[in-house]
Image (cartoon, rainbow, N blue to C red):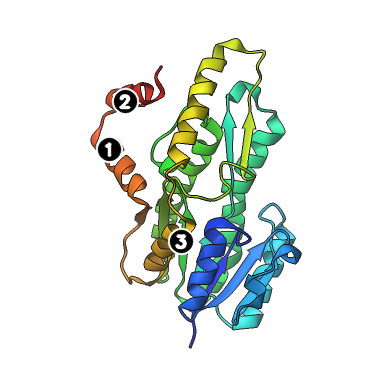
Amino acid sequence: MKKTIFITGASTGIGKETAKLFQAKGWNVVATMRNPSNDAELSLLDNVLVTKLDVLDLASIESAVKEGIQKFGKIDVLLNNAGYGAYGSLESFPRENIVRQFNTNVIGLLDVTKALLPHFRQNKSGIIINISSIGGKMAFPMGALYHGTKFAVEGISESLSYEVGEFGGKVKIVEPGAIATDFSGRSLDFYNDESMPEYQPLVGKMLAMVQRIFANASPASVVADVIYTAATDGTNQLRYAAGEDAKMVIANRQQQDDVTFVAGMKALLGV
């Protein structure tokens, strides 16, 4: 019997590449996105259900889960991929943008997971794969909101792994580095108030560093390959770095104390 993966944020980038990979490997795919009418590729593939899901809309979550189970009978893997990055000085962010960042990257992830937990528990199986980031292991300047959400995903995932283990489920965390997606474009919510001169030197240096980092970004297919490994390796491994830069950054952060790491970050920024 074919296995089925349920993916959030499948319209572009990591989600789309993962949908295509799993379909090519013979899986059923529930590819969810906010605007399925815009899809011109996934819906043409065999054994792929493209349907609407907005992680900020509980009704759409429940409907997509129900539709996926009705279509394929069983969901074996959940990929919580939907999300975006909010960067800029905290002082400049409107509160509604702060709430939206956490609602999308954290509360939305929890809502989708909760919608599938009864199904996994009933089947005494199920793998939950949460997309974190190197930004869930360390923090760049100007990323209090984004890093806050990814640090939260790390803690949620590690704690939840104990719970789902009670019925035979597993949780996996995938931590990409710089990936050639629209993260630094359409999926970036950037705020900077130029009337606050104290922050401007750091803002400029941070933006320059991001450009350097993403100039050598890995393709989204690199992350899709790691997600497939996490879904199929049969191990209890919790964390998976995705991309050579991610492996290097995470290893360095683990080996360095806070003072050393922060000094290195400041040197990299030139501050």
Q: Is residue 15 left or right of residue 134?
A: right
Q: Report if residue 32 is visible in the image.
A: yes
Q: Nearest the camera: 163 or 51? A: 51
Q: Nearer the viewer, mark 2 or mark 3?
A: 3
Q: CA distance from mark 2 to mark 1?
A: 10 Å
Query: Does residue 205 lie above or below 156 as drawn?
Result: above
Residue drawn at point x = 58 percent, y = 24 percent: 89
Q: Which residue is mark 3?
A: 221
Q: Nearest the camera: 109 or 90? A: 90
| Residues at circles 2 and 1 in contact by the CB criterion of under 8 Å | yes
Q: CA distance from mark 3 to mark 1?
A: 24 Å
Please state which amino acid type lies under the numbered disc 1.
Answer: Asn
Q: Residues within 10 Å of mark 2 (few under 14, many from 20)?
A: few
Residue 10, percent from left and from top:
60, 62
Residue 171, percent from left and from top:
42, 61
Which is more N-terminal, label 3 or label 2? 3
Please state which amino acid type lies under the numbered disc 3.
Answer: Ser
Query: Tag 1's secondary structure?
Result: helix
Q: Which residue is mark 2?
A: 264
Query: Tag 2's secondary structure?
Result: helix
Q: Residues within 10 Å of mark 1 (few under 14, many from 20)?
A: few
